[in-house]
Amino acid sequence: MRLGVLDIGSNTGHLLVVDAHGGAAPLPAYSYKEPLRLAEHLDEDGAVTQAGIDALTEFCRQALVVAEDKGCEEMLGFATSAVRDAVNSDTVLEHVRSVTGVDLEVLPGEDEARLTFLAVRRWFGWSAGRLAVFDIGGGSLEIAGGQDEAPDVAWSLPLGAARLAKDWFDSGVPDEDSIRALRRQIRAEIARDAGNLLRSGAPDRAAATSKTFRSLARICGAAPSADGPLVPRQLPAAALAEWLPKLIAMSPEELAVLPGVSPSRSHQIVPGALVAEAVMDIFDLTALEVCPWALREGVILERFDQISVLEGVWPGRSEPV
């Protein structure tokens, strides 16, 4: 089956076309994405601006054409923090639906954390033992942990890199006092519910997903994406602690040329690094393993779990097994 997964994130709109069937790993066939930056298209009241609505609607229209051209039998569309938290969320979704016919499901933060956890569990397998998963998105930070495929605990915090960049860095690089205040706020937010994860003991394995973590790992010496997804990658706490003062001192232009950093996201690197540092410090982690699978793969896996392996069709056969 060819499936289109339309992911409307706080930074990017991404259509991932995959070939998959029950019991198989999803095989990416095509990718179409645009930088929407919805987390930064919010007015002072917390509503998505008309410019943001127009950009989202046009992307969904184009994504539908791409999905049809690539032969998708089904398209799953979902939106995360930026749309979820917008005060005009219903208006935004109805406008997209009426203009394009695309029906976007808004994922609650807990579901976002749960589905990301599912993807990471499938990637590392049962040998990972008790697993902790962290995902820094554009609008939120997701945290989940557990021993099974469904996490024991899963929650979301408004600590996304784009959200923090807009709230704290909108007028340029903040001074030392502002950095300290931001650092204090991040740590207080994470620590408030940290006991949910720590109560069951230290994880056997701690993993990170998302562009922010991948960029930070690359800055700290991890292999480039061109080496493929099977190469092990880590974000060591010691390396990040060494890099953080340098990142804070850099101009946006200097940040933009660092390895693994997209110029459109360079202003998000410092707030993202402060969140990553806080995660590793509060949960007493010496390193995070970077997982190439995240929320999109979790959505795909859950959809294909609904298709029994026994009801599948063997390659080259036209009859169900």
Image (spheres, rainbow, N blue to C red):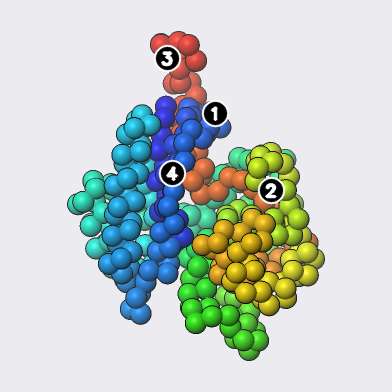
x and y percent of residue 240 in the render? Answer: 74, 66
Q: Nearer the viewer, residue 244 or 310?
A: 244
Which amino acid type corresponds to the residue marked 3 in the rendered image? Pro
Q: Is 278 or 266 nearer to us in this picture?
A: 266
Mark closer to the chain start, 2 or 3: 2
Of the two numbered discs 1 and 3 in the rendering, the one whose residue sits closer to the viewer: 1
Which residue is denoted by mark 2 in the rendering? 224
Three-letter code for the amino acid on which mark 1 is drawn = Ala
Tell me, for residue 24, which label it has, or none: 1
Return the mark for residue 3.
none
Q: Distance between the residues labelled 3 and 4?
A: 32 Å
Q: Which quarter of the picture shows residue 262? A: bottom right
The answer to whether residue 126 is seen in the rendering is no
Spatial distance from mark 4 to mark 2, Cα to Cα?
21 Å
Which kind of residue does numbered mark 2 sit on?
Pro
Above or below, comparing residue 43 to residue 308 in the picture: below
Q: Which residue corresponds to mark 3?
A: 320
The CA span between labels 1 and 3 is 16 Å
Looking at marks 3 and 4 on the same chain, the residue that comes earlier in the sequence is marked by 4
Say which residue appears at 24% left-offset and 48% top-offset: 100
Residue at numbered disc 4:
32
Task: Give the farthest residue toward the left.
Answer: 98
Residue under the image location 42 percent in, 27 percent down: 1
Q: Position of residue 241 (x, y in %)?
A: 76, 70
